[in-house]
Amino acid sequence: MLPTHRPRRNRKSEVIRDMVQETRLTTHDFIFPLFLIEGQNQALEVKSMPGIYRYSADKIIEEVGQCVELGIKTFAPFPSINDSLKDRLAKESANPEGLYLKTVADIKRQFPEVVLMTDVAMDPYSSDGHDGVVDADSGEILNDATLEVLGQMALAQARAGADIIGPSDMMDGRVAWIRRVLDENAFSHVSIMSYTAKYASAFYGPFRDALDSAPKKGDKKSYQMNPANKREALRELALDEAEGADMVMIKPALSYLDVIHAVKERTHLPVTAYNVSGEYAMVKAAAQNGWLDGEKTMMEVLTSIKRAGADAILTYFAKEAAAVLRRG
């Protein structure tokens, strides 16, 4: 007996395929991470991330302008801080005259329409390279002592013009702490996008190369999540919702599509996903070796993240993907 139901009828032409397509990418989906360094007229390619550069403040303004023309309107800058400015309490993170905060303010001044999501974590500014305060004797990451630092960091970023605060540290209670600090200082309009489930992943290597932010001793497993766990992400989600997060994030994305989906099914908050440096580097390396079609693979990767449930995607592919989307 020949089949009555023929799903291929909905695939028989490009027009029909487009009409019934379930998941669509647009430039509105993208948040573009940018790397910031000291100096002038600097655009240094990250060797482990072909096509991605570390920019001085003047050059990062140019990059933002080019991206805005492509339709990208949301950016997440990350700073590379000189070692001489680092200390165990990350004091430079709250310096309004420092590289990061001055550049955030400058971007907002020149492009008031863009949205800036700033990173709240100690590791770029810490002499220990950790996301929290390290006990000098035991080496333990001190959760509650870190909250005070994170609160002041978030407040300084809000004063500089940040639209969204992104605590990426994974300390317990930091969303509630930051929300209170912001509200008490008349920044109740500033959003918090919590890194709800940030895993202790092997996919972060190129990012740490770009910012020289790897831990000096030990690892981050006492605060970042075990890659084997999914239910734990839902516990973190419940806490972030209760503490006042406006958006939640899963990091990394590709190996955690099931976590993105599970979180999306259980929250009414916007869900974001971070398509991290190692995921980007894998596609680029394979494409350079001729093993994959880089452009098609990029678009498939981004579509899969959105299909899993992400409302927005932090991705180093943002500018390249925006150009593809513009071509249609």
Image (cartoon, rainbow, N blue to C red):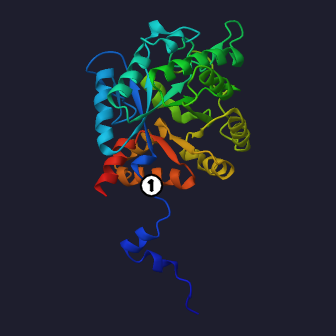
Q: Which residue matches tag 1?
A: 300
Q: Position of residue 193 (x, y in %)?
A: 57, 35
Name the residue: 59% across, 49% down: 257
- Crowding around mark 1 (Cα neighbors within 10 Å: few <14, some 14 to 19, many 20+) is few
Residue 301 in the figure: left or right of residue 232: left
Q: Nearer the viewer, residue 90 or 187?
A: 187
Name the residue: 65% across, 47% down: 263
Q: Is residue 51 visible?
A: yes
Q: Position of residue 255 (x, y in %)?
A: 57, 45
SS for dot 1: helix
Within the image, what quadrant is residue 35 found in? top left
Q: Is residue 198 visible?
A: no
Residue type at mark 1: give it.
Answer: Glu
* Vertical side of 10 occupied by 108: above or below: above
* Vertical side of 144 occupied by 68: above or below: below
Q: Position of residue 134 (x, y in %)?
A: 65, 13
Name the residue: 38% across, 55% down: 296
Residue 101 in the figure: left or right of residue 169: left
Which residue is most to the left?
41
Q: How many marks?
A: 1
Q: Nearer the viewer, residue 264 or 224?
A: 264
* Vertical side of 265 occupied by 288: above or below: above
Which residue is most to the front?
186
Q: Position of residue 37 (x, y in %)?
A: 37, 20
- Position of the N terminus, as image quadrant, is bottom right
Q: Nearer the viewer, residue 172 or 2?
A: 172
* Vertical side of 148 occupied by 235: above or below: below
Name the residue: 51% across, 26% down: 119
- Position of the C terminus, as image quadrant, is bottom left
